[in-house]
Image: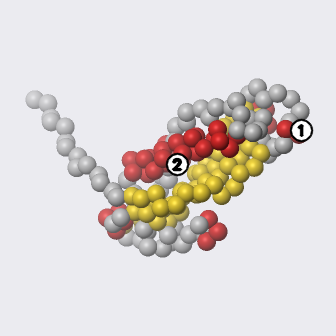
Amino acid sequence: MSKKPREVEPLTVNVILENFRVSSFHYVEPEIIDSPLTTVNFGFTMKQFLNEDYTRLLMRPTLAIRREEELDGSPLFEMTCVFTFKIDQPERFVKGDEIDFPKVFLAHLTGIAVSTMRGLLPAKLANTVFINLVMPLIDSSPLISKEPFKVLQVPKKIY
């Protein structure tokens, strides 16, 4: 006799994207680029912070485009955004002195950040030599925090 799959309660978390902004944006001027852009690498990193009362989750993704052969060098293009998500009833996720959001929840918010940056990219690249670059699909799971949050203070400069 086979076991019936265990039913899981759906997770409902009320979240509001409270604030979004491009915090930095720069690219290399066309005259500095000395050869055609044939192979480039899209690098994506994510920093995550919590405020003191756990009600605000800040995600700071950075997209950097580098030549494939110069991955350790300065990026040809770089954009950083800040997303502030207001979380209702975060105390549900507090365990001792940590807060452990479900990974599926963080994956959803990370997907929002990545998709927003993907949509913003053509507008930011419109009048540059990078206009024909298309951001590939990326697996955002490596960007998700693997450990429970222990951060109690948010650096003021990222607001």
In the rendered image, the vertical position of residue 128 relative to residue 159, given as above or below: above
- Give the number of marks: 2
Question: Neighbour class for label 2 at 10 Å: few (<14), some, many (≥20)?
Answer: many
Give the left or right position of residue 4, taking residue 39 as reference: left
| Secondary structure under the numbered disc 1 in the rendered image | helix
| Secondary structure under the numbered disc 2 in the rendered image | helix
Question: For the view shown, which residue lies furthest in the left direction?
Answer: 1
Residue picked out by circle 1: 31
Marker disc for residue 56 = none
Q: Is residue 149 visible?
A: no
| Quadrant of the image containing the C terminus | bottom right
Q: Residue at image x 69%, y 55%?
A: 24
Q: Is residue 16 visible?
A: yes
Discs 2/1, front: 1
Which amino acid type corresponds to the residue marked 2 in the rendered image? Ala
Marker disc for residue 113 = 2
Which amino acid type corresponds to the residue marked 1 in the rendered image? Glu
Q: Which of marks 2 and 1 is nearer the N terminus?
A: 1
In the rendered image, the vertical position of residue 133 relative to residue 50, given as above or below: above
Q: Position of residue 98 (x, y in %)?
A: 42, 67
Question: How far apart in space, not on screen, are marks 2 and 1 (Cα)?
Answer: 32 Å
In the rendered image, the vertical position of residue 2 relative to residue 156, given as above or below: above
Question: Neighbour class for label 1 at 10 Å: few (<14), some, many (≥20)?
Answer: few
